[in-house]
Image: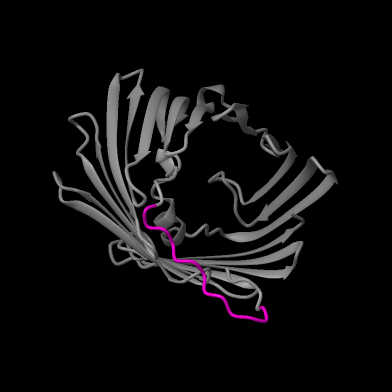
Amino acid sequence: MGAKASRCLELAPAEDDTQGPKNPGPFERLHDDCRRVVHCNTFEGVKFDVSKPLTPTFAVNHNFWLGGSHYPSANQHYKFGATLGDNERVCFGSVDQYGTVEGQIVGAVAGPLQGKLIFNLPNDPQAFVGICDLDYIGTTSSSQLKVARNIHGVNGTHLGCSYVQAITKRLALGGEGILQAAAPAATFTSALKWTGDKWSGVASWSAGPPAQPGQLALGYARTVSPNRVTLGTELNVAPATGDASFSAGAEFALKQSRVNLAVDGSGRMQSCVEAVLSPAAKLLFSAEMTLGWAAEPGKPRDSFKFGYGLQIGS
């Protein structure tokens, strides 16, 4: 972001290449630079999201979704939520028409320690999902302890820990281990991230139980024009089986709108458009098309999904 023009032109000081390393962020967010570009948040139907601040620290939210739902057998969805927060912590809770209760509590615990509690309680108590994280945010490193229940589509209790360290100004290394207490089975992931002036690249390797082949994930994001155009791509490969998937995307930030386009190797193309009508109103357009060149016999060859949305309130 440039400064306003002044009477005399001054050269900006050159960036100090000897500057020490900075905190690289949590391990679970190392791939966010590319995934933000190659994955669009598409939806089907019509959405209305209305937020109303009642006090400086408390707000309520109404979400209406017609023609779609998080539940496969439903084509409408209503959710009521409330948010309470200040500079140190934020609490969010919601309940929908089907009785599902969700909640999140995020905030500072003490000094560099931060905590996060997320839960989802549907009508079936056996499908309860809960996540409790304790994060340490240091000057050049981040670490996390995790206790979770029924996550990633796997039932049972999960225990995890991760650590990521900035080695230099541009290089960061880290690792994560997750133990499924019920199996028991463990998954280990190691990752490397390099951050350049206009691009960033991430490589991670995950190894699990013998029945699950190891997987290599590569991500790349490049800023073509600062705060305007960003390109990204992601590749996932399982060397033992030869299975691979890839995706590519682009993000364009215009004066009053944002456009996100993505395509992957399965024939799926996605697009999202976010138009700012006013500081308190946004209009959303969503489209997704999947080419059925590999469709199973008896199923539709191609599929199309379209969505429209309106967000009112901050």
Q: Tell whether 62 sits left or right of 222.
A: right
Q: Magenta span: helix, strand or loop, mainly?
A: loop
Counting from the top left corner in percent of width and height, residue 213 is at: 19, 38
Find the magenta span and give its range. 6-18
Q: Residue at x 41, y 26 (%)?
A: 155
Q: Tell whether 281 sits left or right of 270.
A: right
Counting from the top left corner in percent of width and height, residue 9 is at: 59, 80
The image quarter in which residue 205 lies: top left
**Nearer-the-camera pick, 243 or 220:** 220
* Residue 14 falls within the magenta-colored stretch: yes
Counting from the top left corner in percent of width and height, residue 304 is at: 47, 67
Q: Is residue 109 above or below residue 241?
A: above
The image quarter in which residue 280 lies: bottom right
User: In what quadrant of the picture does the C terminus appear?
Assistant: bottom right
Q: Which color scheme is applied?
A: one colour
* Residue 144 falls within the magenta-colored stretch: no
Counting from the top left corner in percent of width and height, residue 31 is at: 39, 50
Q: Tell whether 23 sits left or right of 234.
A: right
**Nearer-the-camera pick, 17 or 211:** 17
Q: Residue at x 56, y 76 (%)?
A: 10
Q: Is residue 225 above or below residue 64?
A: below
The image quarter in which residue 256 lies: bottom right
Q: Tell whether 99 sits left or right of 36.
A: right
